[in-house]
Image: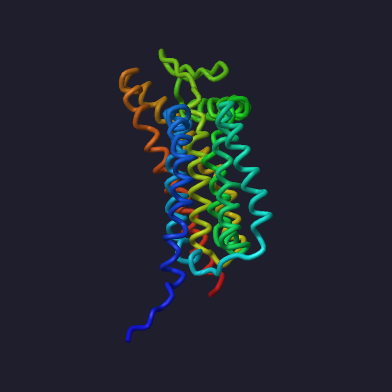
Amino acid sequence: MKTLTQPTLSAAWPITVLPIAIGLLLMYIPTFIGVARTFWSQERGTAGPIILAICAWLVWTKREALSSLPSASGTAYRATLLFIFGLACYVIGRSQELHVLEVGSIIPVCAAVIWAMRGMAGLRVMWFVLFFLLFVIPLPGSLLDAILVPLKQQVSMVSESIMYALGFPVARSGVVISIGQYQLLIADACSGLSSMISLTGIGLVYVYLARNPGLWHNAVLLLAVLPIAFIANIARVCLLMWVTYAFGESAGQQFHDQAGYLEIVLAFALFFGLDALINIFRRRMAK
């Protein structure tokens, strides 16, 4: 005679989550398609798909830890209020084309779902993923302008100073740099904002996953993210100026199209190089 066994929690988990996952996908796939067309198609928004892919990967890595938690009890009321708040943000943002509200609503909505199903323990497991979703929210144009204008000024000023110190015939007027007979405009894409956002997000993920034992180790890495991104962008602009001056405007334009990849590689090399130096210093101090 066969005995009937109750399905385990891990076996029942996909059946419970599937309808909720389908509902969330139906809500937010159109949202991210619109964001991709509006923001991610521009160079300053290229970090968006990378951040979203990292969020999806983090959710996948946390699935076992989340499914092993017991079902929540006594949290439905508070989780429902949070879900209503998130849904209201979604409806207002969607109807009024306020992408900050529409995309940002995914954080309270997902937090409410996790809270209702797995309680505060579930939120503790997923806190970093929910926090990291902040990087997916597109910044409003007024805030971007407030960041981009001084950033472009700094990039153009530092780049001009470096090239002048190296002996190149260079002058600057605002964000327009003249080198030889050529003029280069420091546009939004050359401000380095995209690389700063990308490197900050990936730096946070690296620090979170690396679990370095020293608090100062993590603090130095996080504090170094923005300076590293700025230095990498300055190197990109200086190289672009040199290529344009040495080989002409057409060569400079071709290099400009590929310089973004060089900037990312240089920024990551500096970041991981700093991490390696800190590890070497820690080992020597331990001895």
In the image, is 14 to the left or to the right of 230? left
Q: Is residue 11 above or below residue 171?
A: below
In front of the other: 85 or 284? 85
In the image, is 253 to the left or to the right of 190? left
The image quadrant that residue 147 belongs to is: top right
* Residue 249 on image: x %, y %: 34, 17
The image quadrant that residue 239 belongs to is: top left
Q: Residue furthest front?
A: 1
> Measuring 43% from the left and 57% from the top, which residue is drawn there?
60
Q: Is residue 284 above or below residue 150?
A: below
Q: Is residue 189 above or below residue 124?
A: above
In the image, is 246 to the left or to the right of 85? left
* Residue 181 on image: x %, y %: 41, 13
- Which quadrant does the N terminus fall into? bottom left
Q: How many numbered tags mark residues here?
A: 0
> Measuring 48% from the left and 42% from the top, which residue is drawn there?
198
Q: How is the image coloured?
A: rainbow
Q: Is residue 283 above or below residue 134?
A: below
* Residue 186 on image: x %, y %: 49, 22
* Residue 180 on image: x %, y %: 42, 16
> Measuring 55% from the left and 73% from the top, which residue is drawn there?
286
In front of the other: 94 or 12? 12
In front of the other: 215 or 169? 215
> Measuring 51% from the left and 29% from the top, which residue is drawn there?
191
Q: Residue furthest bottom?
A: 1
